[in-house]
Amino acid sequence: MKTLFIVYILINGFWIPGDMLDGWGSINYKTEEICLERKLYAEESLIRLKQINPRIFDKKFECIVNKNLTFKVK
């Protein structure tokens, strides 16, 4: 099923969807499995980045599965 990968960024105590910020738009994937692989990669990358720069914005990642989504997929 089609899956949407969404990044949320913690700004001033609020989780802001990346779609509301330049350069952080959601990514569409063909399957949930691919999206979950990318989510794990993003989470692991964030851990490494925080070790280098502890002041980096907190982020969280989500995969939303929806059989009714229509978009071009990667």
Image (cartoon, helix red, strand yellow):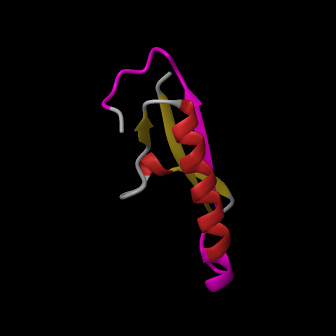
On the image, the x and y values in percent for residue 30 come to: 43, 30
Q: Is residue 58 magenta?
A: yes
Tell me: 44 left or right of 6: right
Residue for point 36% across, 21% down: 70
In the displayed structure, would residue 65 be above or below residue 42? Answer: above
Q: Is residue 58 visible?
A: no
In the depicted view, which residue is nearer to us: 39 or 22? 39
Q: Residue at x 50, y 30 (%)?
A: 31
Residue 50 in the image: state x and y as whole percent: 66, 76
Q: Is residue 53 above or below residue 58?
A: below
**Residue 19 x/y as whole percent:** 43, 46
Q: Give the residue displayed 46% in from the left and 25% down from the top.
A: 2
Residue at image position (33%, 27%) is 71
Q: Which residues are magenta?
A: 49-72
The reply, left or right, for residue 28 in relation to residue 10 is: left
Q: Residue furthest top?
A: 68
Residue 67 seen: yes
37, 66: nearer the viewer: 37
Q: Assign the C terminus to one quadrant of the image.
A: top left
Please say if 62 is above or below 41: above
